[in-house]
Image (cartoon, rainbow, N blue to C red):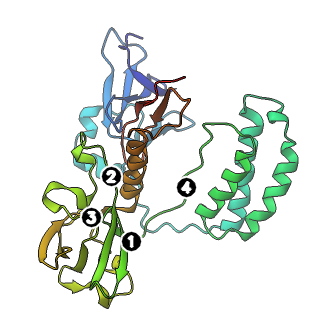
C-alpha cells in the first residue's frame, strides 16, 4: 500500500479498502479517519472524516461506526469524503440517543472493574512472579472494600491502592464514569493562601505561590503584573460583596474561573485600592503549587549536601494539555 509514513493506529479492512486512524503531532493530538482502496493505482490515502475519536467496522464490513465529538455516526464503509462533507449526510448518519435509557447497577459494575484491573496486571505485568506477591490473596483483600465504595473516584482509590502493592512505576488509575452535570459549578481560586481575619476587615493574603520570574505566564492570579497583591495585604471584598459576610471566600468564587473579578484590597498602611484579577481552576492551582515546589528546589541551598543535581521530568497531562518537560537543578555545593 503506497501510504506515506505517519502516526497510524487501528488498522482495519472493509471489503474494498483499508482504514486507519491518522494522528498528527499537535498537543493535544487530532485524529482523522483515513482510508485507501485495496485495488488502488498509486492513489494517496483519503481523509474520510476529520476530528474523530475512534471507529469500528461492522461484522459484515458494510458499515462504519464513528465517534466524533459527543456523537456517534453510522454510514457505508465505502463512503467518500465528498459525500460526508454534506451536513445533511452527517445529520442523517447521526445516531439519535436522546431517548436511550440504560439501567445499570454501579455496585456490580465496580466489582467487575476492580477484577478487570486485577486481571490486567496478572496477565500483562512484566514480572510473572508479581514482585513476589500473592496476587490472588491481594484480590481477595481488596475486593470486599468495593462494597463500601460510593462513586467511581473512591473505586479508583481502591484500585490504585491494590496495584501500588506491586511497587512499580507507570501504573496509573484515573477517570471513568465521572461526568459533569450540565449545572456543574466549578470553584475558582486565586493561587494564594488566605486567612479570615475579623480585626483586619477581610481575608489576609498569607502566601502567594512563587513562580519562576523567567516564566511570567505561569504566575498565579495575584502575582500577575496588572493584578499584583502583596502578602500581608487584606482582601476586603469581591465584586462588591463583603468577604466577612460569607462563611468562606470560595462562596464568592463559584463559577468565576477565567472571568475578571474586582477585588478591594487594603494595604498594610490602611489604604484601599481596586484590583482586577482573573481566577483559575482548582486543577490549575495544583499545577501552580507544584511549580512553586520545583522553583524553590532551584534556589541556593535547597538541594541537600552530597547531591550533585536533581533531575525533574514532568509528564504530559492529557486533561490540561500541558506538554511535559525536563528540568535539571544543579547543586549549589557542586559535590557528588
Q: Is there a contact, CB below 8 Å, between mark 4 and mark 2?
A: no
On screen, residue 329 versus residue 46, left or right, reads right
Q: Nearer the viewer, mark 1 or mark 3?
A: 3
Image quarter of the C terminus = top right
User: In percent of the image, x 66 and y 51: which residue is there?
Assistant: 160
Neighbor class of circle 4 (other Cα within 10 Å; few <14, some 14-19, many 20+) is few
User: In percent of the image, x 73 and y 50: which residue is there?
Assistant: 162
Measured from the top left, where is residue 218 in percent x and y?
A: 28, 48
> Which residue is farthest bottom?
245
Measured from the top left, where is residue 169 in percent x and y?
A: 63, 36
Q: Which residue in the structure is indicated by mark 3?
A: 279
Point out which mark residue 176 bears: 4
Q: Nearer the viewer, mark 4 or mark 2?
A: 2
Neighbor class of circle 2 (other Cα within 10 Å; few <14, some 14-19, many 20+) is many
> Could you give the CA–CA distance between mark 4 and mark 2, rounded to whole angstroms?
33 Å
> Could you give the CA–CA distance between mark 1 and mark 4, rounded to whole angstroms?
17 Å
Q: Is there a contact, CB below 8 Å, between mark 4 and mark 3?
A: no
> Could you give the CA–CA distance between mark 4 and mark 3, rounded to whole angstroms?
28 Å
Mark 3 or mark 2: whose residue is earlier in sequence: 2
Q: Is there a contact, CB below 8 Å, between mark 1 and mark 3?
A: no
> Could you give the CA–CA distance between mark 1 and mark 2, rounded to whole angstroms?
30 Å
Q: Which residue in the structure is indicated by mark 2?
A: 210
Location of residue 64 by image quarter: top left
Q: Which residue in the structure is indicated by mark 1?
A: 184
Q: Is residue 300 above or below residue 244?
A: above
Amino acid at each position: 500500500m503506497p501510504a506515506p509514513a505517519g502516526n497510524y493506529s487501528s488498522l482495519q479492512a472493509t471489503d474494498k479498502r483499508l482504514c486507519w486512524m491518522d494522528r498528527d503531532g499537535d498537543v493535544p493530538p487530532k485524529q482523522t479517519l483515513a482510508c485507501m482502496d485495496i485495488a488502488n493505482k498509486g492513489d494517496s490515502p483519503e481523509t474520510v472524516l476529520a476530528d474523530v475519536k475512534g471507529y469500528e467496522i461492522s461484522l459484515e464490513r458494510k458499515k462504519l461506526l464513528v465517534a466524533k465529538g459527543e456523537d456517534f455516526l453510522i454510514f457505508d464503509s465505502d463512503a467518500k469524503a465528498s459525500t460526508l462533507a454534506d451536513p445533511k449526510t452527517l445529520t442523517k448518519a447521526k445516531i439519535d440517543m436522546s431517548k436511550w435509557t440504560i439501567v445499570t447497577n454501579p455496585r456490580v459494575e465496580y466489582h467487575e472493574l476492580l477484577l478487570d484491573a486485577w486481571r490486567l496486571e496478572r496477565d500483562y505485568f512484566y514480572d510473572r512472579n508479581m514482585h513476589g506477591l500473592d496476587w490472588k490473596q491481594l484480590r481477595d483483600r481488596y475486593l470486599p472494600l468495593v462494597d463500601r465504595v460510593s462513586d467511581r473516584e473512591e473505586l479508583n482509590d481502591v484500585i490504585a491502592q491494590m496495584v501500588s502493592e506491586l511497587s512499580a512505576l507507570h501504573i496509573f488509575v484515573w477517570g471513568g464514569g465521572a461526568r459533569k452535570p450540565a449545572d456543574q459549578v466549578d470553584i475558582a481560586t486565586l493561587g494564594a493562601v488566605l486567612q479570615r481575619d475579623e480585626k483586619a476587615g477581610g481575608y489576609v493574603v498569607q502566601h502567594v505561590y512563587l513562580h519562576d520570574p523567567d516564566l511570567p505566564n505561569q504566575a498565579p492570579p495575584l502575582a500577575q503584573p496588572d493584578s499584583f497583591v502583596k502578602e500581608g495585604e487584606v482582601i476586603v471584598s469581591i465584586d462588591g460583596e463583603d468577604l466577612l459576610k460569607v462563611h468562606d471566600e470560595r462562596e464568592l468564587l463559584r463559577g468565576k474561573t477565567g472571568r475578571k473579578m474586582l477585588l478591594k484590597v487594603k494595604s498594610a498602611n490602611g489604604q484601599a485600592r481596586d484590583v482586577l484579577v482573573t481566577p483559575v481552576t482548582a486543577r490549575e492551582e495544583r499545577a501552580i503549587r507544584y511549580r512553586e515546589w520545583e522553583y524553590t528546589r532551584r534556589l541556593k541551598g535547597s538541594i541537600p549536601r552530597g547531591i550533585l543535581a536533581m533531575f525533574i521530568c514532568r509528564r504530559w497531562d492529557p486533561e490540561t494539555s500541558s506538554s511535559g518537560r525536563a528540568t535539571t537543578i544543579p547543586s549549589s555545593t557542586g559535590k557528588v
